[in-house]
Image (cartoon, grey):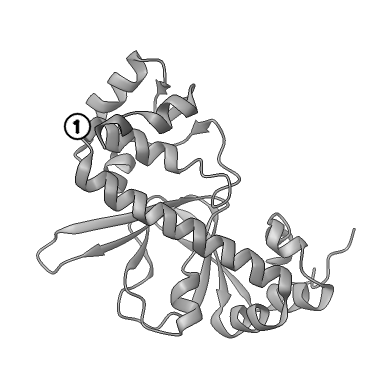
């Protein structure tokens, strides 16, 4: 099958996403023509706090995070976004300076949908508008849960919740049961040291929720992982 706008290098990648396949052909052509594909190294800034929000951001490969850092180095991570996830729609809709940094945790290939294209689709495509509304609603719920977890849960439970959140079926539909995720990367998502993350993962492994391998984690009991520590609330 030939995709509308298939002459764009991003068309085939966008076609892996449900929201793109739901668009009318003319909107698929618009989206494909208005999307850039860029690779960022680990630690690279995809978007910076205070800059105008020029793109809606999708992760094709890799892992990124949304975070805020103070001049003295203190930080707060709002969310990690694995391959298949999208973020930044709120800032693009409001056409305002971004209020957080978007940073690659590992080398990541990222799809960047230009702000004018995003807002044209939002105004002219009912399937796209419906997707964005669901995305905003799910993201808000995730952010509320993250703030709650960071303030009220112990370290082991924070690690459990950070891993479980990467399996959100609406926000991250491509997450597999084996996460190529290092302990250092989980530390970047949770604000914990690698050593403390290691302790937490060993406890979760001993209780049968995860199985640990080099640079990867197999989730063996997702429902228990999601519930872990929540009795503390």
Q: Residue at x 81, y 78 (%)?
A: 26
Tell me which residue sits at (55%, 41%) in the image. Answer: 175
Residue 162 rendering spot, x and y as whole percentages = 36, 41
Count of residue discs: 1
Q: Residue at x 81, y 72 (%)?
A: 24
The part of the image, by quadrant, that contains residue 42 is bottom left
Query: Do we see residue 29 in this rendering?
Result: yes
In the picture, measured across the screen, residue 95 lies left or right of residue 125, that is left
Q: Position of residue 211 (x, y in %)?
A: 42, 20
- Estimate the x, y position of residue 36 in percent, counting from the top left: 59, 72
Res 69 quadrant in image: bottom left
Q: Which residue is mark 1?
A: 196
Tell me where residue 197 appears, x and y as whole percent. Answer: 25, 32
**Which is nearer the eye, 59 or 19?**
19
- In the image, is residue 16 above or below residue 169? below
Question: Which residue corresponds to the image point at 73% horizontal and 66% vertical from the top-left?
Answer: 11
Secondary structure state at the residue bearing disc 1:
helix
Q: Where the C terminus falls, by quadrant?
A: top left
> Taking the image as drawn, is residue 188 in sight?
no
Q: Is residue 187 above or below residue 127?
A: above
The quadrant of the rendering that contains the N terminus is bottom right
Name the residue at the right extreme.
Answer: 1
Corner quadrant of residue 203: top left
Q: Vertical placement of 30 versus 152: above or below?
A: below
What crowding class fits label 1: few (fewer than 14 Cα within 10 Å), some (14-19), or many (20 or more)?
Answer: some
């Amino acid at each position: 099958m030939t995709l509308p706008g298939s002459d764009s290098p991003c068309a085939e990648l966008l076609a892996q996403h449900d929201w793109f396949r739901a668009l009318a052909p003319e909107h698929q052509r618009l989206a494909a023509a208005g999307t850039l594909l860029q690779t960022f190294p680990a630690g690279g800034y995809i978007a910076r706090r205070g800059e105008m929000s020029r793109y809606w951001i999708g992760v094709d490969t890799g892992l990124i995070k949304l975070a805020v850092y103070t001049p003295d180095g203190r930080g707060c991570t709002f969310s990690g976004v694995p391959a298949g996830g999208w973020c930044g729609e709120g800032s693009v809709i409001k056409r305002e300076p971004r209020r957080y940094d978007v940073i690659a945790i590992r080398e990541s290939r990222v799809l960047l949908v230009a702000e004018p294209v995003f807002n044209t689709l939002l105004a002219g495509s009912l399937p796209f508008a419906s997707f964005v509304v669901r995305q905003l609603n799910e993201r808000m719920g995730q952010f509320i849960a993250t703030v709650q977890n960071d303030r009220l849960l112990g370290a082991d439970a924070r690690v459990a919740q950070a891993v479980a959140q990467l399996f959100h079926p609406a926000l991250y539909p491509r997450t597999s049961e084996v996460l190529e995720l290092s302990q250092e990367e989980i530390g970047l998502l949770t604000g914990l040291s690698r050593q403390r993350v290691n302790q937490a993962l060993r406890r979760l492994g001993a209780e049968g929720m995860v199985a640990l391998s080099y640079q990867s984690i197999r989730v063996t009991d997702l429902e228990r992982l999601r519930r872990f520590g929540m009795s503390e609330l």
